[in-house]
């Protein structure tokens, strides 16, 4: 009996791998939350057996690292690399990295508490990002002992800014104009008026983000400028 020849070319279905697992796990977590993610559920979504899944990941914690890497790999390091090559300034590199970081995590706000506390030791893309940022900041003249405080300060601000994008624009509105909220309402009203003016200013860079909170961008620019200015003061002459 003649043996059937194996077909030449790519398989009709992508071969199971960690990148595919990460993307499908990310979709599940966004849809249902991390608590409801199970290895059985993930295997079903991938159309494989659980045993096949375990050929690529050890457990749920391993999947969480894949999710972290899948997100962090989207953060731009282009200008950080230019800074290392002395083709960009520290200010340009920090601005590009921060804006990209915020844009990526603004799409997945529910994952911020997870990513913020997940160790990076077994996440290669995450390690690469931090290593590149550290090298770039050092190359700009920031002393070794100050680099981590810069990175952590930026990240703390960026996580909050990513959440703010998804906040309701009326988050500071009081239910009435009582004396308990009079001062708050005064500054909220003035802030909204000013921000509408600043938002219309074409000289400010605009990020391609679908913002639920129209008022999130101006405070972000204010905070980012402050962080960059403070970081520049650390540069050794």
Image: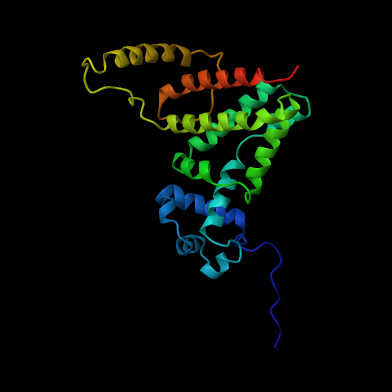
Side of 21 where 218 appears, left or right = left
Q: Residue at x 61, y 46 (%)?
A: 120
Quarter of the image containing the N terminus?
Answer: bottom right
Q: Position of residue 59 (x, y in %)?
A: 54, 61
Side of 186 where 207 appears, left or right = right
Quarter of the image containing the C terminus?
Answer: top right
- 23 above or below 199? below
Quadrant in the picture for residue 205: top right
- 64 above or below 200? below
> From this viewpoint, is residue 205 visible?
no
Q: Nearer the viewer, residue 206 or 137?
A: 137
Q: Position of residue 115 (x, y in %)?
A: 52, 43
Q: Residue at x 68, y 33 (%)?
A: 133
Q: Residue at x 73, y 27 (%)?
A: 83
Query: Farthest residue in the front direction?
Result: 145
Query: Farthest residue in the bottom direction?
Result: 1
Q: Position of residue 168 (x, y in %)?
A: 36, 29
């Amino acid at each position: 009996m003649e043996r059937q020849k194996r077909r030449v070319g790519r398989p009709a279905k992508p071969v199971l791998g960690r990148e595919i697992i990460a993307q499908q796990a990310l979709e599940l977590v966004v849809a249902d939350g991390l608590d409801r993610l199970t290895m059985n559920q993930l295997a079903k979504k991938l159309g494989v057996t659980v045993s096949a899944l375990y050929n690529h990941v050890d457990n749920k914690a391993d999947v969480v690292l894949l999710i972290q890497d899948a997100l962090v790999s989207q953060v731009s390091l282009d200008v950080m690399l230019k800074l290392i090559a002395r083709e960009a300034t520290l200010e340009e590199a920090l601005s590009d990295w921060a804006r990209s970081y915020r844009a990526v995590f603004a799409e997945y706000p529910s994952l911020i508490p997870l990513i913020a506390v997940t160790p990076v030791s077994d996440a290669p893309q995450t390690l690469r990002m931090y290593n590149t940022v550290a090298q770039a900041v050092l190359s700009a003249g920031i002393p070794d002992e100050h680099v981590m405080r810069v990175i952590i300060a930026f990240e703390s601000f960026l996580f909050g800014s990513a959440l703010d994008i998804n906040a309701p624009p009326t988050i500071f509105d009081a239910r009435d104009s009582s004396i308990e909220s009079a001062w708050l309402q005064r500054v909220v009203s003035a802030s909204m008026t000013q921000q509408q003016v600043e938002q219309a200013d074409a000289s400010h860079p605009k990020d391609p983000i679908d913002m639920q909170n129209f008022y999130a961008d101006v405070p972000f620019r204010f905070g980012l400028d402050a962080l960059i200015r403070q970081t520049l003061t650390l540069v050794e002459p």
